[in-house]
Image (cartoon, coloured by chain):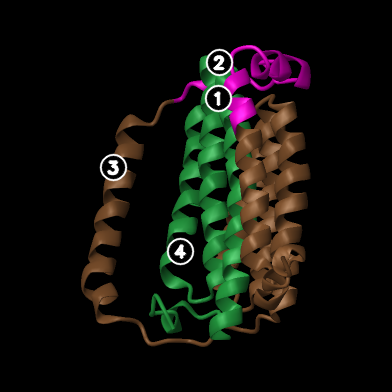
Chain colours: A brown, B green
Amino acid sequence: MIHLTLFLVFGAICVAGAVNLLVQRHPINSALSLIAVLASLAVEYLLLGAEFVAAVQVIVYAGAIMVLFVFTIMLLNAGEEERTRGSRVAMVIGIPSLLIGGVLLAWVLVRHSGTEAVLAGALPGSPENVAWMLFHEFLLPFEVTSVLILIAIMGAVVLAARPEATSTGPGKES
Amino acid sequence: MVPLSYYLILGGILFACGVCGFLIRRNIITIFMSIELMLNGVNLTFVAFAAHWQRLSGQIFVFFVMVVAAAEAAVGLAIIISVYRTRETLNVDQVNLLKL
């Protein structure tokens, strides 16, 4: 019962934050509501017994990635986005397909909704178990992701560096 | 106990919100945040199915998705900075030329 209550409360916060991300005009407001979504998703992970994933969600997602977003918004001095008139294609194709998709989804949910309950904490997702699997079965993908991160860091530095700063490297005189 | 379908519905709602934001927003940073929202909806279904099938590999995949999301955020925001530097706008409607 307590699990269902927690799920409903934090799920409501999740959905409210996601909708708020859509309707806010200023990007910084969208970023802050995205942080609310990510933090309440961490609680949902805890309810599912995924302790390691919940911790990483808070540290990496709500911490590092969102700091990067907020820094970029402040660096570029992003203002409110201007309104544009809706395109005709959206009216002709978008709204009917949205209706069709919604009806299909509702039909599937009504007809095939399962009632199997997920046992909270039944699966041990502690850092110890996750690390055991990560460094045995998934060792090669783990090492490959470290190379990926290295390439991403170098790409970000190259892309974001000022053009005059890159042209005056130390090896220019030779 | 919470039924599995509730988690899947929540993940689906988050993914749908991300798709809507990707399609209707004009600010390139907000579009990028919508992509992060979609990734999180998928992550929630991964963890829910991991708990349902009692397989830990779902959580490992969430870890890898987070690593890819971090790399994507770093490179994408660097691209956004360089786009802003050359065009002085964040509106995707005005970014319509491959080369200036």
Q: Amino acid at mark 2?
A: Arg
Tag 4 residue: B22
Give yes or no for contact between labels 1 and 2 (Cβ–Cβ under 8 Å). yes
Q: Amino acid at mark 1?
A: Gly
Tag 2 residue: B55
Residue A127 lies, in percent from the top left, at 76, 21
The magenta span reads A115-144
Q: Is residue A141 visible from the viewing direction of this image?
A: yes
Residue A32 drawn in magenta: no
Q: Amino acid at mark 4?
A: Phe
Tag 3 residue: A107
Q: Secondary structure at mark 2?
A: loop
The chain identifier of the residue carrying mark 4 reads B
Q: Residues within 10 Å of mark 3 (few under 14, many from 20)?
A: few
The chain identifier of the residue carrying mark 3 reads A
Q: Seen in the image, is B5 located left or right of residue B2?
A: left
Same chain for marks 1 and 2?
yes
The chain identifier of the residue carrying mark 2 reads B
Tag 1 residue: B58
Residue A75 lies, in percent from the top left, at 74, 75
Q: Quadrant of the C terminus of chain A?
A: bottom right
Q: Residues within 10 Å of mark 4 (few under 14, many from 20)?
A: many
> Mark 3 or mark 4: which is in front?
4
Q: Secondary structure at mark 1?
A: helix
> Mark 1 or mark 3: which is in front?
1
